[in-house]
Amino acid sequence: MGLKTWIACAALGATVVTGAGVAVAQDGKAAENAVKVRKAQMQIYAYNLGVLGAMAKGQLPYDAETATNAANSLAAASGMRIPGAWLPGTDSESFEGSRALPAIWENGDDVRAKAVALWEASTDLSDAAGMGLDEMKAAFGPVGGACGACHKAYRAPAN
Amino acid sequence: MGLKTWIACAALGATVVTGAGVAVAQDGKAAENAVKVRKAQMQIYAYNLGVLGAMAKGQLPYDAETATNAANSLAAASGMRIPGAWLPGTDSESFEGSRALPAIWENGDDVRAKAVALWEASTDLSDAAGMGLDEMKAAFGPVGGACGACHKAYRAPAN
């Protein structure tokens, strides 16, 4: 990844969680939209991780272009700054269907660090995905690790 | 937008619609995942367009950082290449809940051109969003136009 890109993206986590800078009214509709957009972001992660995971497990033949597309989409999604997606009042105890534990809003620095870790691992995977199956698999692990670290700490179990 | 970025992204529409290069089995689960991920992509468009639209209409105070975040997210989402999202057999006549008209799969070149138009308008908006309300509004129009052009041609009415 080029330095310019890194600089452009490095601060991505800065407004995650605080919701600062987004003056959307915290009414029901805003909360609903917040949960929808963050679930959409997770869905994009899940789909593309599914493609790469299937290749890593040998369930889908490795293809450099497909792997690169998936990794690039993952990196693009993890680089998005959507602070309004983490509107206060949309935690699992306040909003039906949310699995975002209240601890997210109490540990901003840690959550931001975990978001940056995901983005960094994803951009590494972007660089590696087209270089061969082994290279892709090696870079895939840290992305899975970054997902898991955040889910373990901050996601409520599925009902 | 830098030339390098443009080159990196310019071919984004190349595999849209054909689904080529994604050898995911076309079973029910694959179709469901395809519809989910493209709806997620649309959701990310909708959310960020909502933020920018509210600013354009004066419902939300203009803020350069918030506008830039939203425009960057829009550009990132419209630059994603997720050919598997447009799996054949997931049109509105074949898959419940899909509003993607069968014409999408019959007009690949036009759909690709419309996808590229959205991406180009979104990257222009990315460049303009932080420069002031008037600049953002001027660049917002073409993005709305690109959304509308595709929806008018290829999206079934909501039920």
Image (cartoon, coloured by chain):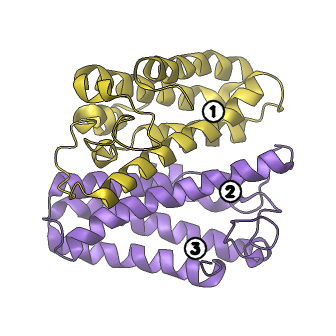
Chain colours: A purple, B yellow
Q: Nearer the viewer, residue A69 or B105?
A: B105
3D distance between C-alphas at marks 1 and 3 = 27 Å
Q: Is mark 2 on a helix, strand or loop?
A: helix
Discs 3 and 2 lie in a common subunit: yes
Is B12 drawn above or below residue A129 in the view shown?
Answer: above
Q: What element carries label 3?
A: helix
Residue labelled with disc 2: A35
Residue labelled with disc 3: A114
Q: Which amino acid does label 1 sit on?
A: Leu
Q: Which of marks 3 and 2 is nearer the N terminus?
A: 2
Q: In this view, does A52 lie to the left or right of B67?
A: left
Is B130 drawn above or below residue B36 in the view shown?
Answer: above
Quadrant showing the N terminus of chain B: top left
Q: In this view, does A88 lie to the left or right of A45?
A: right
| Front: mark 3 or 2 | 2
Where in the figure is residue A117, as x and y percent of width and height? 51, 71
Discs 1 and 2 lie in a common subunit: no
3D distance between C-alphas at marks 1 and 2 = 16 Å
Is B141 drawn above or below residue A31 in the view shown?
Answer: above
